[in-house]
Each structure stands twice: as C-alpha cells, then as structure tokens.
Amino acid sequence: MSKFSFRYANDLGEGVYAVDTGFVRPQFDASYIVTQRAPSSERIAIIDTGTNYSVPRILATLSDLECTADQVDFIILTHVHLDHAGGAGTLMQACPQAQLIVHPRGAKHMIDPTVLRAGAVSVYGEQTVEKDYGQLLPIDAQRVISAEDGYMINLAGRILVCLDTPGHAKHHITIWDQMSHGAFTGDTFGLSYREFDTEKGPFILPTTTPIHFDPKALRTSLKRIMALKPECIYPTHFSKVTGVPRLYQKLTDILTQVENLGKSLERADHRHELLKNGLLNLYIQELRNHGCQLSDSKIEQLLSTDIELNAQGMGVWLG
C-alpha cells in the first residue's frame, strides 16, 4: 500500500505512478510519473501528458507525492497524438527545469503545434478540438530533445531507453525501464481497458488509428519489445498490465484478424461502415472468448470511439 494518498493516481510500484488524466472517461487515458531518489531530492520524469485539461491532475499528483514541478527533469512523449501530447506545452511551462523528449519526427510539432492542431480540427472540427484539447502551446526548441533510437535518459541514475517503435505512428517511441523491467508503450502494445478484465486477466486489442497504421512495422516493433522480456507493460490506455507473453499472443492474433478483415473489404462499397461492423463483431467475439459478461451494447459503447478511429486508420492503410 502506498504511503501517499492520491486524488487521481495509483502507485504501481518501483517508483512508477499512473495518473488518470480524466480524458474521455475514468481509466481511459494515463500519464505516468517515474521517480528516482537522488541525494538532494526526488527526481521525476513524466511519460505522456494527456491533454491541456489533464495538466492540473498531473500537478496535483506531484503535490500528493510531496514533490514540486521544479523536480521534473524530463517530460517524455511516446508520440504526439493529442491524447498523449496535447498538454505538453502547458506542462512544460509549469515545469521550468524539464526537457522534452520526443521522436525526431514529432519534435517540430511540439516546437510549433500549428499543423498538429489544424490536422485535428480538420477531422473533428474546431468546437470539438477546443472542448477536448484546448489550445496547444509551443515549446522552446532549446528545451526539446529529439530521441533517436537507443537514446538513453539518465534520471538520477535510473536509465530509461528510447526505442523507435513504429506501426501505430511513425513518430512513436517506447521507453524501456530496466528498474521495473517494464516498457512504456504508448499505443504500440495496444489498448487494455480495465472494464474488460476477467478471471483470465486483462484483455488487449491493437489500435489502428489514422494515419500511420502499418501492420508489418507494428509486428516488428512488438517483437522488439518482447525481446526485452518485459515483466510488465505500461500502455497509455490504461495503466500497468502483466502476463505479457499471453497479451502479446492475443494482440498479434487479433492483429491478424484485423488485417484479414481489411483485405476482405478492400474493394467493397460502403467500406467504412462495413469495417466498423466487422471490428465490432470481432471485438465482441474475442471478449466473449475472454469471459467478458458485459452486454453487446455496453461493449459497443465503450469501444465506439476506437471502432470509428480504427476503421478510419484501416481505410488509410488499404488506400
């Protein structure tokens, strides 16, 4: 049991804390706080930020940990999709000592987020983007580090290694933490929502959101993560999961089914709706096999956004 009392976070052990960012619904979107004892004070890295509206929860959790924003040395982004990085500019302002670590392809979008936000507006509209994400603040280029594959972050002696892991996004990194034998995988290792946990353990499914879904690259990235023999995975959606070999097998199995579904509908009329229906049926069947007792309508409700975005991403992949 943690010695701290949290308003928005859970203690995952090994100095790792999952903050529920409040995006969409409870236990949907996580930001991770990693702590390491140093001679003078606890030093902190934050992995993924959620949206602008998530930043108060992260700062409140630092306070719950009896730490200050001045102790944050690094803010690390797995990738720059807005549910992971939308709050980066605001959080960097609040943490004056921090450096931002991001994939080289994502660095320019953090320095000048104009194109990133415009892309979101083109998909969702200005009103939705403002409601869900707010304005994206630019980050001083002098505070941004482009993390090439293998880049090592030294958090007061705790080494975090950045691995280039495309497949979900070309600008995606996974952060390997030797201390916890865990990998912070963003969206590369799929989505695992706590509502779908059963006696068999957590459920997992791949995310194929637009625009960079590439199943071949994703499989390569997954194999690279598994080669580290992780004891746990820290996905952004949502929080720590164990039993990694079983999850990997299930993830790759569903990925194969997703690919087959897409190829079967490649030239179909009304393809997008057929992809959505096919994904829903696939997920429901897999959840039934997993022992999930939720109703079909509840499963559809929980996965509605993912189904829409995954179908869009498959459409881009199919061309």
Image (spheres, rainbow, N blue to C red):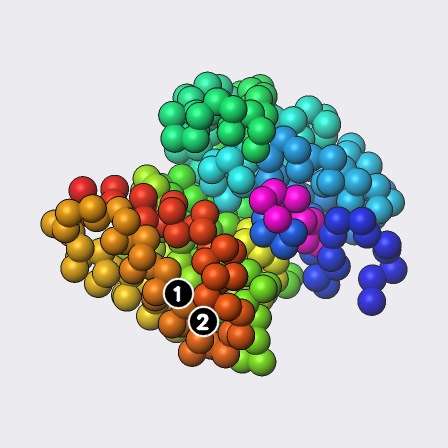
Res. 124 in view? yes
Q: Toward which corner of the image does residue 116 lie, by quadrant?
A: top left
Image position of 107 with respect to 256: above or below? above
Res. 14 in view? no
Residue nearer the viewer, 62 or 282: 282
* Residues in magenta, as a range: 17-25
Quadrant, the N terminus = bottom right
The residue drawn where x is 38% and y is 47% is 308
Q: Which mark is residue 26?
A: none
Left or right of 28 in this view: 313: left
- Residue on which the image places disc 2: 287
Image position of 205 with respect to 20: above or below? below
Q: Is residue 281 one of those drawn in magenta?
A: no
Left or right of 30 in this view: 216: left
The residue drawn where x is 60% and y is 35% is 51
Q: Which mark is residue 283?
A: 1
Asked if marks 1 and 2 touch (Cβ < 8 Å), the reply is yes
Residue nearer the viewer, 170 or 123: 123
The residue drawn where x is 72% and y is 63% is 13
Query: Going by the picture, which residue comes out furthest to the left?
Result: 267
The residue drawn where x is 58% and y is 52% is 28
Image position of 257 with respect to 132: above or below? below
Left or right of 274 in this view: 114: right
What is the spatial separation of the Cα atoms under label 1 and label 2, in whole angstroms? 6 Å
Image location (x, y in percent) of residue 293: 53, 74
Image position of 202 with respect to 88: above or below? below
Amino acid at pointer 1: Tyr
Query: What SS does tag 1 mark?
Result: helix
Q: Toward which corner of the image does residue 45 lie, by quadrant?
A: top right
Quadrant, the C terminus = top left
